[in-house]
């Protein structure tokens, strides 16, 4: 349930500077009672309230929009769930800040672990949403770099109706797959979590590689440790909070009347909790404590979400402290407190009591390091998370992963795991949907049946036909003064070269081969240079003809009948020499694209 941290409340007889209230749902319904803020008599809502919400990003987004709808510019929101890109949209959530860092190095960490154990044939199950697709993209990139294979990719639909119709398909995909290693990535409050529990409850035993969100050791009574034995979980690295275990292990429900204590699992000590009255405890010995609860279903280590809450409280305290040090204007205090707090939180950076750096500027946050845990199964249904290693993206390549090899324990009872070897298909082949066989790719090229090929052919034939008609007209009237005045031979050369230019695109249609690849470039280059040089020759001829009419000019000696032919020949020869040099230095070759389409070579 979300928490409210009240900052600078106005209208209170006693003005606290920082107070935590867990009765959030009173505010969303607008019921302001004296019990809303324990030990304080408040008449109106505080000038600024900091709300902690999570762990689901959907819940956080709904909480934020709902509260800002009731109390605009009076609520700041800190989320303790996993980082989600949607919540980083400043336009939708201008007053929301995520405590968790972005898991940009998580795919690299998982691939490093997979490489360490030579698991080159793994399955992947993710949520079918933006976050899951983004993770798939990053993970696929890392796996392709290291020549690793996906045995299957299950994308669990978030729509409950679609999920129910495909649940058996998801189950059979994992059941029939030959891969013993499956990566799980997604949120716990989702259909993916439901699938995960169904698979394990039906006896599917795999080496699950997942994140701390799927922390099965803190589950309720449905936790079956033997089904999760060997599971590997990645969690953000953080130092241990000094004194936390001793503080919690010494707690006894009879010594404290706080409501949250009554919600702990005191049934481990034969303490009953009445459903109607949370605060009523029965059969509890005064000597009961949480000392042995660590060996049951309660994990004494801070989870990622708990650590985010820990940092969120300190972040709020630091920002509130900075706000108290600033001068306050009573006339603008009510409206400006939250805006100033927003600015202060955005700029907050400090080192928390355990020695970790906290920076609220998302652009300046460092990539997280990861602790790697393994779940061990003990007799009598006891499960325990054991740290077996660490991953740091700041170490040199090859030294980023460090494992405690001597304490690794697998479900088979040994440190050896059966590995299904996979071979990458050649570039001219592709794997089938089950990734069991390789099939030849179909060679795809521009053909006359393709729309683009048909359009190109039609245009080439139309322009060729039009130019041929013009050439026919010139030939039919070759003895007329008009044709002779246009330099008949040059006109013939120009029209013929244009016809060949229009026909050159047909060389690009059809299956390519080496001779055609050479002719495509050279033919068009030479023919086009002849056409351009013909235009140049006609221009030079006209200029010389006008210059000759001036008396005393010797330029008439250059106006010989074959002068225009020399211009065309020289230009064509230059083009041929350039083409020959090009063929000798960098000859053309057939370029194929094998990545754009899975089953085709373009």
Image (cartoon, rainbow, N blue to C red):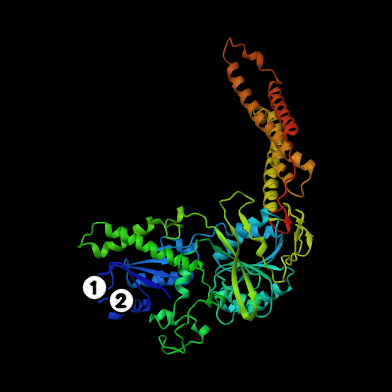
Identify the residue position indicated by label 1 in the image: 12
Question: Are dots 2 and 1 in contact, CB under 8 Å?
Answer: yes
Q: Residue at x 68, y 49 (%)?
A: 456
Q: How many callouts does the rendering have?
A: 2
Q: Quadrant of residue 165?
A: bottom right
Disc 1 secondary structure class: loop
Q: Residue at x 77, y 42 (%)?
A: 516
Position of the N terminus by quadrant: bottom left
Image coordinates for residue 511, horizontal then vertical, percent = 77, 49
Q: Quadrant of residue 258?
A: bottom left
Q: What's the CA distance linking mark 2 and mark 1?
A: 10 Å
Name the outermost residue toward the front: 287
Within 10 angstroms of label 2, few (less than 14), some, or many (20 or more) residues? some
Image coordinates for residue 26, horizontal then vertical, percent = 34, 79
Name the outermost residue toward the left: 331
Q: Residue 16 vs residue 370: left or right?
A: left
User: Can residue 81 be spotted in the picture?
Assistant: no
Image coordinates for residue 187, horizontal then vertical, percent = 54, 70
For this rendering, which residue is in front, 177 or 457? 177
For this rendering, which residue is in front, 256 or 63? 256
User: Can residue 426 be spotted in the picture?
Assistant: yes
Looking at the image, tell me whether mark 2 or mark 1 is earlier in sequence order: 1
Q: Residue at x 50, y 81 (%)?
A: 265
Within 10 angstroms of label 1, few (less than 14), some, or many (20 or more) residues? some
Disc 2 secondary structure class: loop
Image coordinates for residue 404, horizontal then vertical, percent = 64, 60
The image shows residue 170, relative to residue 336, as above or below, that is below
The image shows residue 176, relative to residue 549, as above or below, that is below
Identify the residue position indicated by label 2 in the image: 37
The image shows residue 79, relative to residue 142, as above or below, that is below
């Amino acid at each position: 349930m979300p928490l409210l941290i009240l900052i600078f409340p106005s209208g209170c007889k006693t003005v606290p500077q920082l107070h935590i209230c867990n009765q959030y749902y009173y505010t969303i319904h607008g019921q302001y009672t004296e019990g809303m803020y324990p030990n304080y008599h408040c008449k109106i809502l505080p000038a600024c309230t900091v709300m902690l919400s999570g762990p689901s990003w959907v819940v956080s987004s709904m909480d934020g929009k709902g509260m800002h709808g009731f109390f605009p510019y009076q609520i700041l929101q800190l989320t303790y769930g996993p980082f989600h890109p949607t919540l980083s949209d400043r336009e939708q959530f201008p007053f929301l800040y995520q405590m968790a860092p972005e898991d940009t190095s998580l795919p690299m960490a998982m691939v490093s672990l997979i490489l360490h154990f030579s698991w080159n044939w793994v399955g992947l199950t993710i949520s079918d949403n933006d976050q899951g697709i983004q993770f798939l993209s990053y993970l696929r990139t890392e796996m392709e770099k290291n020549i690793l294979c996906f045995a299957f990719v299950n994308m669990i639909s978030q729509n409950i109706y679609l999920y129910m119709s495909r649940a058996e398909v998801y189950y059979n995909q994992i059941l029939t797959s030959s891969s013993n290693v499956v990566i799980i990535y997604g949120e716990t409050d989702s259909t993916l979590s439901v699938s995960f529990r169904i698979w394990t409850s039906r006896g599917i035993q795999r080496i699950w590689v997942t994140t701390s969100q799927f922390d099965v050791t803190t589950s309720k009574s449905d936790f079956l440790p033997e089904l999760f034995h060997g599971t590997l979980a990645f969690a953000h690295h953080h130092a241990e909070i000094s004194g936390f275990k001793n503080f919690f292990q010494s707690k006894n429900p009879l010594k404290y009347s706080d409501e949250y204590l009554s919600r702990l699992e005191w049934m481990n000590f034969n303490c009953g909790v009445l459903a109607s009255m949370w605060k009523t405890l029965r059969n509890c010995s005064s000597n009961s404590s949480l000392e042995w609860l660590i060996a049951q279903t309660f994990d004494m280590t801070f989870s990622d979400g708990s650590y985010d809450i820990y940092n969120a409280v300190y972040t709020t305290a630091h920002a509130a402290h900075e706000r108290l040090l600033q001068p306050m204007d009573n006339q603008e205090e009510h409206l400006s407190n939250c805006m100033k707090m927003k600015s202060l939180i955005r700029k907050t950076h400090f080192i928390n009591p355990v020695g970790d750096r906290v920076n609220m500027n998302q652009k300046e946050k460092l990539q997280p390091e990861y602790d790697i845990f393994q779940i061990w199964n003990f007799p009598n249904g006891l499960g325990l998370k054991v740290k077996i290693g660490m991953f740091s993206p700041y170490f040199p390549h090859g030294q980023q992963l460090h494992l405690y090899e001597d304490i690794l324990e697998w479900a088979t009872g040994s440190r050896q795991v059966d590995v299904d070897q996979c071979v990458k298909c050649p570039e001219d082949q592709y794997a089938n949907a089950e990734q069991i066989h390789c099939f030849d790719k179909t060679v795809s090229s521009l053909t006359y049946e393709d729309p683009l090929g048909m359009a190109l052919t039609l245009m080439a034939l139309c322009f060729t036909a039009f130019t041929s008609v013009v050439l026919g007209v010139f030939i039919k009237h070759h003895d007329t003064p008009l044709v002779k005045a246009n330099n008949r031979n040059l006109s013939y050369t120009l029209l013929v070269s244009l016809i060949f230019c229009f026909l050159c695109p047909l060389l690009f249609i059809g299956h390519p081969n080496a001779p055609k690849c050479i002719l495509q470039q050279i033919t068009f280059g030479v023919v086009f240079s002849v056409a351009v040089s013909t235009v140049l020759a006609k221009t030079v001829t006209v200029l010389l003809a006008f210059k000759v009419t001036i008396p005393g000019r010797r330029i008439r000696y250059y106006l010989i009948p074959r002068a225009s032919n020399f211009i065309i020949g020289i230009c064509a020869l230059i083009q041929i020499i350039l083409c020959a040099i090009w063929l000798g230095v960098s000859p053309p070759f057939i370029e194929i694209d094998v990545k754009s389409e899975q089953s085709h070579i373009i």
